[in-house]
Image (cartoon, grey):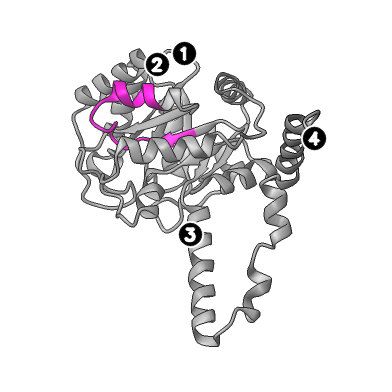
Amino acid sequence: MHFVEKKPEEKRIDLDNKLKSNKILRIPGAYNPLTAKVIEEIGYDGVYVSGGVMSNDLGYPDIGLTTLNDVSNRSKQIARVTNLPTIVDVDTGFKSCKETVQTFENFGISAIHLEDQIEQKRCGHLDNKELISKEDMTKKIKECVEARSDKQFKIIARSDAKSVEGIDKMIDRCKSYIDAGAEIVFPEALKDETEFEKVRKSLDCYLLANMTEFGKSKLLDFKQLEELGYNIVIYPVTTQRLAMKSVEDGLRAIFADGHQNNIIDKMQTRKRLYDLVEYEKYNSLDEKIYNFSTEGHE
């Protein structure tokens, strides 16, 4: 039971309308449902679920070890607590693009992105990546498009070809992906403004920019990206990095000090947590149900 009002179809329509607004959409990653609620409360445009974050959360490196079940169930938990559209990274499609699309669509997701690496993929900002052929990726995109029942469920094509084949061949690949039915293109690991601009001038579609920390891309302000013609900017691992740094620092302090009194001010309070999870709404609903069920039975 939850207090989210919008149906999955409405969230997909919202994403489509936001894209048509020509304003860049700012979409941080959520590593858990509670983070998705914060993202919505602050006023962002959507929620992103990173494949790398899902791997990290399970204690794995981002090399294609997660399964469709791992990522889809966590994504469902995240998407259902927010009225914002949720975009999910499905790596290389988990062996069956048809099953992947149908699963995520049924779980209330608004869009997925698929990449053109081999199944034993690597993080997009690492070297030594291997690609599948342009033709094989095109087939995957077509399979995704045909598998969806809601035409507002968006298929995003990510290309990791820039660091393998060069930017020109990556652009050529992306043109084929658009022809195959991808409505949004995600050119991974672009270096700077010059490369972002070149891709924009070469492709006629919605574009997604990845502003991940400690990677190959220069971290640009969202207004710069908007001026360059990009439609979505994601911050995929930011919340997990912030959280894990705080967790490490706090645990080390308790280990050294023997108590947590010195780090209380770094913690989310009980009141703030209860506000975020709408404790009183659930409590009042529980009371109504309880009172109704006992009425006339005293």
Residue 293 placement, left or right of 201? right
The mark tally for this picture is 4
Q: Secondary structure at mark 4?
A: loop
Tell me the crowding category of disc 1: few under 14, some 14 to 19, or many 20 or more residues within 10 angstroms, Cα based: few
Image: magenta residue range: 87-103
- What label sits on residue 148 in the rendered view? 2
Q: Position of residue 181 (x, y in %)?
A: 37, 16
**4 or 1: mark nearer the eye:** 4
User: Image quarter for residue 43?
Assistant: top right
Can you say which quadrant of the picture contains the C terminus? top right
Instruction: Inspect the image, locate mark 3, and give the three-letter code of the amino acid beneath it.
Output: Arg
**Residue at the (54%, 80%) spot, across then down:** 254
- What label sits on residue 298 in the rendered view? 4
Residue 30 in the image: above or below residue 111: below
Q: Position of residue 224 (x, y in %)?
A: 58, 43
Q: Secondary structure at mark 2?
A: loop
Viewer-closest of 249 and 189: 249
- What label sits on residue 126 in the rendered view? none
